[in-house]
């Protein structure tokens, strides 16, 4: 059920985002783009980056993704994307061996020895280049291509970053006039909590190589082009930094806080940075306050006076409707309202409650009358054989003695066979449970507001809650008293003298008098015995009914326990989601959406009647809520009704600014002067965006030579909130601020870029350097090229 709730929230979020994006602008990239992922550890990034690009870029169909990996990484790709725009290439014969001391250099040597492997790599990159060429119509210009290289700092395959990047650049250069190449280096400090020694050493080794690649005089030549005939052609890079810009992104931000979503934020930054640098220009009113991104200017600003190129990091924050939390909170409040409606007392009288279960006095009497045969059968006792006894002989006997003298045990046997056994058999055949169930079903069909809570309380023993069992117990006591009185009366009459019987006697006609006496005896004794039997059957029937009503009470109690347990689960899921949503202005979600949900429910009730949600096409009959697949089946129905009926309301279609403002003030009385104003809300939003957009890299700030920042808003430049952002520190701003204008109501994204730092500024580098030096001293080798050519450790 937890998975079902999570999936419901995710699906709602995706659908809402899809709907808002249909109303919002999608951006377009200006030039074609290729994302080159190097190493097995970048596997999870591919589908995430692709999904983000597909969601935001309307010409993303032409964007290609190439993943270069080892054979060990194949199993991790079994569930990966099967899109035609994603190609995966395995470097055959590049295993690295089992000795961790020489993994990277051994892989490096094997790469150059494997001519066939190089040819296959050439062919894979050419196929990708050819595929990109098929989508030329999607782009404004086909003169340039943006090549984004993505690798993990601790992945052994990053030993080939220069080779793979330059080979890709060279092949793409045959189709495009220029190739702009950026590198994204990902650091997962969370993963290195366990393997901190070797992982940190390998990471520092790559960073040292990276420092070498980004030197102004860096050059490279290698026979990387391989033709189908096995001929090699050199690829040359002349003195210049290898990459246009290098972005270093970690799962720990500059405040030292570890990201809950691991590297997901870094993948989002890759997508937004790529759009920032390669966005198709959109016409908008000129505003000198809105600065556009200029790559050359940014590079110059992060370069030291000595010409040393700085590195870049970024931070990203979003403000949008917390759709997942909204879905779960609305589901909880909808269910809670349904539970409240189900528990509401409809104000039924005792007679109505008894009639619902089919146990009012009239119905019980009617049912008892069907158990005991009619009195007419007593007349058949006249056919019983009598002993040769005269009336004169029995006239002074008691009725009990006279019956014995006349019939022996014949009358008792006749009554037992024709009345008592018949009544017992009919009572055994009576299905009280089925009759109760039928009565309840009929009653509930007539009134949909009668449900499990009413059935539970009314089948209970508490009269103050409308329980009918006190009535049944009282009826049992009354019937028992009536039976006791009838037994005493019969005993008294049976002891009376025959001569005292009231019947017409004829002198000197003994046989006639005897027949009249027998007839009076039957009526006086056996009519009463039949009445006693009726009362006894009534007691047994009441006992059976009370037992079945008690069984119903327990069954309904069990169902209510299940319903209450589901309510607890829904509440827990909603509160947990709200806790996460608090990161992005999630206050008052429970309170605000309780009111919104009630408003939507009340509107539906006003249109369709109070029982609208218990119709068959909605939740169905209350009594049968849990009959099919238990609480899981009920949850499926709840989600369906909530998704199709409640969440489609216009109350859930507000812009993120309107929704936040209303939600922020929902707990404040209208007369309260502390109502959150729009400006105060914007101030809070602005602060949230700035706090959440902290740079995703931990630096020693005091050793940093130069810190240069630019900040960009992805949103509607004409919206009140974005205008507020531009006016906050307009006169004192020391950073460059720009907006990528997109007509949107779904939210705002803020991207902070910070550049100018160097490797020695990284805490990751400083902490890992001691491990790197220790591993080198203990015989470990990390580099494919000669370590002497690398810069000294700083």
Image: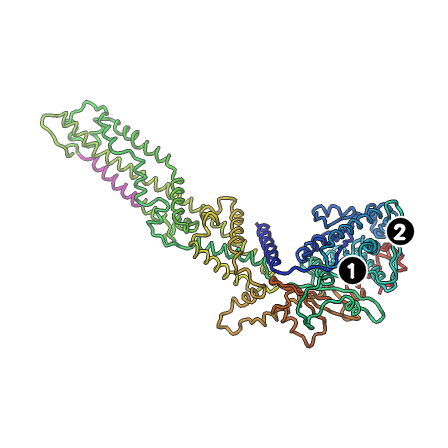
In three-dimensional space, the C-alpha distance between marks 2 and 1, rounded to whole angstroms, equals 24 Å
Q: Visible in this render: residue 80?
A: no
Q: Is 705 situated left or right of 564 in this image?
A: right
The residue at 48%/73% (across/down) is: 671
Residue 59 x %, y %: 69, 56
Which label number is shown at residue 233? 2
Q: Is residue 97 above or below residue 202?
A: above
Q: For residue 572, which quarter of the picture?
A: bottom right
Which is more toward the observer, 449 or 305?
A: 305
Q: State the SS at label 1.
A: strand
Question: Which residue bears the numbered disc 1?
Answer: 182
- Which of the two discs, 2 and 1, sits closer to the camera? 2
Which of the marked residues, 2 or 1, is nearer the chain's N terminus?
1
**Residue 46: image x %, image y %?**
72, 53
Q: Do labels 2 and 1 touch, CB within 8 Å?
A: no
In the rendered image of this protein, does residue 134 appear above or below residue 489? below
Q: In which quarter of the image is residue 437?
A: top left
Magenta span of residues: 476-496
From the viewer's perspective, tell me whether residue 723 is left or right of residue 187. left
């Amino acid at each position: 059920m937890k998975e079902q709730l999570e999936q419901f929230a995710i699906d709602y979020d995706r659908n809402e985002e899809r709907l808002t994006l249909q109303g919002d602008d999608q951006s377009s990239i200006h030039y074609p783009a290729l994302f080159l992922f190097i190493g097995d550890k970048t596997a999870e990034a591919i589908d995430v980056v692709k999904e983000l690009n597909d969601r935001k870029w309307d010409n993303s169909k032409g964007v290609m993704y190439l993943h270069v990996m080892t054979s060990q990484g194949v199993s991790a790709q079994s569930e990966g994307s099967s899109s035609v725009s994603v190609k995966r290439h395995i470097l055959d014969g590049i295993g690295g061996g089992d000795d961790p001391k020489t993994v990277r250099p051994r892989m490096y040597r094997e790469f150059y020895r494997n001519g066939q492997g190089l040819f296959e790599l050439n062919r894979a990159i050419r196929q990708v280049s050819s595929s990109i060429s098929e989508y030329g119509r999607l782009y404004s210009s086909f003169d340039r291509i943006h090549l984004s290289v993505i690798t993990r700092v601790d992945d052994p395959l990053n030993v080939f970053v220069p080779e793979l990047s330059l080979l890709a650049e060279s092949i793409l250069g045959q189709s495009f006039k220029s190739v702009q190449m950026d590198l994204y280096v990902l650091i997962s400090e969370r993963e290195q909590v366990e393997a901190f020694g070797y992982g940190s050493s390998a990471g520092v080794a790559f960073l040292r190589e990276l420092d070498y690649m980004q030197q102004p005089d860096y050059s490279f030549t290698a026979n990387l082009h391989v033709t189908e005939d096995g001929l090699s052609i050199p690829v040359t890079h002349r003195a210049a930094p290898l990459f246009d810009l290098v972005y270093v992104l970690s799962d720990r931000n500059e405040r030292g806080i570890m990201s809950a979503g691991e590297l997901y934020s870094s993948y989002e930054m890759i997508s937004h940075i790529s759009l920032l640098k390669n966005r198709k220009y959109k016409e908008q009113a000129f505003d000198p306050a809105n600065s556009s991104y200029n790559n050359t200017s940014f590079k110059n600003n992060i370069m030291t006076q000595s010409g040393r190129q700085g590195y870049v990091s970024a931070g990203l924050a979003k403000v949008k409707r917390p759709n997942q939390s909204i879905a779960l909170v609305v589901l909880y409040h909808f269910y809670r309202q349904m539970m409240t409606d189900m528990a509401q007392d409809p104000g039924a009288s005792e007679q109505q409650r008894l009639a619902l279960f089919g146990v009012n006095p009239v119905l019980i009497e009617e049912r008892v009358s069907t158990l005991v045969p009619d009195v007419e059968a007593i007349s058949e006792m006249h056919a019983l054989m009598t002993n040769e006894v005269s009336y004169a002989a029995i006239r002074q006997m008691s009725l009990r003695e006279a019956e014995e003298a006349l019939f022996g045990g014949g009358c008792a046997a006749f009554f037992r066979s024709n009345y008592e056994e018949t009544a017992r058999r009919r009572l055994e055949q009576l299905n009280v449970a089925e009759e109760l169930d039928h009565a309840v079903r009929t009653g509930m069909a007539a009134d949909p507001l009668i449900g499990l809570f009413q059935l539970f309380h009314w089948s209970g023993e508490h009269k103050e809650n409308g329980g009918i069992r006190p009535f049944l117990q009282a009826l049992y006591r009354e019937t028992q008293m009536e039976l006791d009185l009838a037994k005493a009366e019969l005993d008294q009459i049976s002891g009376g003298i025959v001569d005292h019987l009231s019947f017409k006697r004829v002198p000197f006609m003994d046989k006639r008098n005897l027949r009249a006496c027998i007839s009076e005896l039957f009526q006086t004794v056996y009519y009463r015995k039949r009445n006693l039997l009726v009362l006894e059957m009534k007691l047994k029937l009441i006992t059976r009914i009370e037992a079945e009503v008690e069984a119903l009470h327990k069954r309904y109690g069990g169902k209510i326990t299940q319903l209450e347990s589901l309510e607890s689960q829904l509440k827990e899921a909603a509160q947990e989601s709200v806790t996460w949503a608090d990161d992005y202005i999630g206050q008052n979600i429970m309170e605000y959406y309780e009111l919104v949900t009630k408003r939507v429910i009340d509107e539906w009730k006003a249109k369709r009647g109070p029982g609208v949600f218990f119709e068959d096409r909605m939740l169905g009959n209350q009594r049968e809520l849990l009959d099919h697949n238990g609480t899981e089946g009920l949850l499926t129905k709840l989600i369906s009704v909530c998704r199709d009926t409640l969440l489609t309301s216009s109350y859930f279609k507000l812009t993120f600014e309107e929704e936040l403002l209303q939600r922020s003030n929902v707990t404040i009385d209208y007369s309260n002067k502390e109502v959150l104003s729009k400006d105060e809300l914007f101030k809070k939003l602005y602060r949230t965006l700035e706090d959440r957009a902290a740079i995703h890299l931990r630096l020693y700030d005091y050793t940093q030579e130069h810190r240069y920042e630019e900040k960009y808003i992805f949103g509607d430049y004409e919206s009140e909130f974005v205008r507020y952002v531009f006016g906050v520190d307009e006169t004192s701003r020391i950073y460059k601020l720009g907006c990528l204008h997109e007509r949107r109501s779904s939210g705002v994204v803020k991207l902070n870029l910070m550049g100018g730092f160097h490797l020695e500024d990284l805490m990751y580098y400083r902490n890992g350097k001691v491990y790197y030096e220790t591993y080198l001293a203990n015989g470990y080798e990390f580099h494919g090229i000669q370590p002497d050519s690398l810069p000294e450790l700083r």
